[in-house]
Amino acid sequence: MSRQKILNSLAAPLLAVAFSLVVVTIILFAFGSNVFEVFNAMAVYGTSPRSLTLMLNLATTYYISAVAVAIGFKMNLFNIGVNGQYMLGGMCAAAVAGSLNLPGVVAIPITIFVAIAVGAAWAGVAAWLKSARGVSEVISTIMLNFIALGLISYTIIRTNVGRPAALNVRGTEIIPPNGRMVGWNLLSPSIKVYGFIIVAILIGVLYWFVLNRTVFGYDLRASGLSASAASASGVNSKRMVVITMLISGGIAGMVGLPDLLGNDPYSYTLNFPSGYGFTGIAIALLGRNNPIGIAFGAILWAFLDVSSQILDIENVPREIVTIMQGVIVLAVVVAYELVRRNRVKSEQQNVGEALAQKESSAS
């Protein structure tokens, strides 16, 4: 990759982050806060061993979610249903894992497979609606999110899958020790880095390989750039929609597994973390659907979430970080468009100079 291309790739996210810092600085200054002290407190707290461990764990989950979204984005498919896919996949995986009494080398792959299968099947509903009936995947996946939440609540509350996990909380059976994915005390003696981070890295490598080194990846990117041109070259667009949505849903099904297999209570409860799917959309945009860019975006997002916990002590509402994240998303879209226009203008200028040089040499 040329130096100019690298600069073009980095320009948009860097501009977005810089702009968000300016906006947050103005807001903090308007409310009488000491901007330097606030940012310094976030930096100090966010780089402590405990915070770095929490950041890595959160980034692991964010990364998987963003990759699930990015696969759809590559083909101009907007899988807004990652939230429902990972929650339903997580519940089914937890229910199966809680009933297994097998060695970890067998139980953990089964748990992961169940999560992938359920997530893919749930995304497959939207894929069928789009390919067979022309229903927008945006509408269908949003509706499927709500249906998934209803199914989860009914299953845990009204069936034998649910059990009292804590006071006024129901959940699946606790996963036996053999079925858990134990992490490592790399940075903090009290908190372990999720073992699922290895799976997240493998997902990123496979994502890059499939997109850049396989025929399917070429067809997917071609369909995203121009569906009509891809169809003219022999690509079955409906088949591509179905396969892409199934892969996206399968990866989405694993989003909840780092928490489920690596953190107490090792059970899927009605208090299971939600919203990771929507965060994945923002991080995929920030990382420009690139596996390395997504990794940096996930780490940045996790750092902001973790470091915001110190703001209450500084008498600053932690919602200021939410504002900053929102501004980053809005700014990165605008920045990408500005960078794209600048690139097109530069390319046109280079073509013009080349033509002029050719004409002068011919004369």
Image: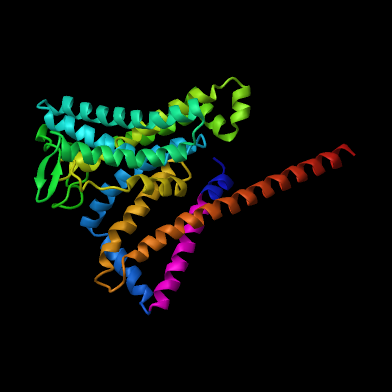
Camera-side residue of 349 and 1: 349
Q: Inspect the magenta stretch and tell me whether residue 19 lies in it.
A: yes
Residue 53 in the image: state x and y as whole percent: 23, 51
Residue 316, above or below 341: below
Left or right? Give the position of 128 relative to 174. Answer: right
Q: In the image as oriented, which residue stretches furthest toward the bottom?
A: 32
Residues 257 and 44: in front is: 257
Say which quarter of the image contains residue 115.
Answer: top left
The boundaries of the magenta stretch are 10-31
Image quadrant holding the C terminus, namely top right
Question: Where's residue 11, x and y in %?
Answer: 53, 53
- Location of residue 267 in the rendering, given as x and y in whole percent from the top left corner: 15, 40
Q: Position of residue 296 (x, y in %)?
A: 39, 49
Number of numbered callouts drawn: 0
Asked whether, in this view, residue 140 is left or right of residue 358, the answer is left
* Main secondary structure type of the part rendered in magenta: helix
- Whether residue 297 is visible here, answered yes or no, is yes
Report whether 339 appears left or right of 33. Answer: right
- Outermost residue on the right side: it is 363
118 to 255, vertically: above or below? above
Position of 234 relative to 42 (above/below): above
Image quadrant of residue 294?
top left
* Colouring scheme, one of rainbow, by chain, secondary structure, one colour: rainbow
The answer to whether residue 81 of the structure is visible from this angle is: no
Residue positioned 49% across, 28% down in the render: 133
Which residue is depicted at the point 28% across and 36% down? 88
Single out the residue that lies furthest toward the top. 234
Q: Nearer the viewer, residue 111 or 38?
A: 111
Q: At 44% from the left edge and 35% from the top edge, which residue is drawn?
A: 71
Could you tell me which residue is drawn at 45 percent across and 29 percent down?
Answer: 129
